[in-house]
Image (cartoon, rainbow, N blue to C red):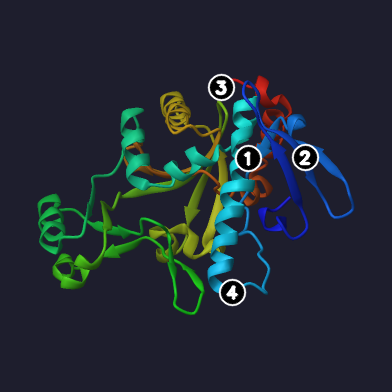
Amino acid sequence: MDAADFPATVSMAATIDSGSAWSGTLTSPNGDTVDLGDIGTVYRRRPTQFGVDERMSAPEKAFAYGEARHGFGGVLSALEWGGCLWVNDPAAAVRADYKPVQLAAAAAAGLTIPPTLITSAPHAAYQWAQDLGRPVVYKPLSGVWHADEGRIRALYTSPVTDIADLLDPALARTAHLFQERVAEQFEARAVVVGSDVFTVRIDAAGEEARTDWRRDYDALTYTRITLPDEVASALVELHARLGLVYGAADLICDHTGNWVFLETNQSGEWAWLAEETGIPVAERLADLMEAGPAWTR
């Protein structure tokens, strides 16, 4: 089910009283129903926005969307209190999307992270980069840019070629994240599912892909590898600290063999890596979903 199916093609009736959890049903247009009490696991995989009636005015649409989010979304989120396992819990997923939270949790879990600055002050950015004395990259904090026309464009990691550019007054218009550019031997994506970590080495043939491998998938080759035990354990601990059952973490292995954590995506892609290398992510997710409330990390 997609969240966009509500309320146009899926309806919900749910009740709660003292001493009980939410109960009720989800109903499809043909009358098929799902009892809320029978749901043991919810796998939250990139739901799209609720579809609201186009006959409503703009303020009515905004109100209807908010009511759907807090009503329909709220009841499904509350199934956790009845023992339902979420992959991932919506509240934890929202919090984990904040890169400052991720970096603090990663450092607390014992992972190496790059020196990082978040600022809206041009002189602070310039001074930090000058004091660092090593190459710097810019990374978006949210990952996308929303154009006026309603289009969405991904923003990628970009090198800061001249730190004098950081003195541009326009930098004061919002927050920016800058990090040391780690001299990489190769990058990797580590898919964390429960207490299992499946890691794929990603080698990039082109300069753009070496800066951010998402820029040029055709330049990439993949190899399944095993992380050092201490790194894998720290990644599992990181996701436990963030309240996540699943996450796709991006790492760099530098020329000394040191592993550096960049970020984790609580809904990160994994299917193409499974096709390329055979990592059993789908099987492990199925195991978790089958276990449902009985699963423990």
* Mark 2 Cα-neighbour bin, 10 Å: few <14, some 14–19, many ≥20: some
* Mark 3 Cα-neighbour bin, 10 Å: few <14, some 14–19, many ≥20: few
**Residue placed under numbered mark 4 in the picture:** 57
Measured in 3D between alpha carbons, the distance from the residue under mark 2 to the one under mark 3, in whole angstroms, is: 30 Å
Circle 1: residue type: Val
Marked residue nearer the N-terminal end (3 or 4) = 4
Point out the image quarter for the C terminus: top right
Measured in 3D between alpha carbons, the distance from the residue under mark 4 to the one under mark 1, in whole angstroms, is: 26 Å
Taking 254 as reference, is 205 left or right? right
Q: Position of residue 221 (x, y in %)?
A: 55, 53
Kindly indicate whether the residue at mark 4 contacts the one at mark 3 (C-beta within 8 angstroms).
no
Q: Give above or below for 167 relative to 42.
A: below
Identity of the residue drawn at 85% across and 55% down = 29
**Residue placed under numbered mark 2 in the picture:** 25
Measured in 3D between alpha carbons, the distance from the residue under mark 4 to the one under mark 2, in whole angstroms, is: 30 Å
Measured in 3D between alpha carbons, the distance from the residue under mark 3 to the one under mark 4, in whole angstroms, is: 47 Å
Taking 51 as reference, is 176 left or right? left
Measured in 3D between alpha carbons, the distance from the residue under mark 1 to the one under mark 2, in whole angstroms, is: 11 Å
Taking 53 as reference, is 209 left or right? left
Query: Foreground mark, 1 or 3?
Result: 1
- Corner quadrant of residue 120: bottom left
The kind of secondary structure element at disc 4 is: loop
Residue at far front of view: 18
**Residue placed under numbered mark 3 in the picture:** 297
Specify whether residue 161 is in view: no
Circle 3: residue type: Arg
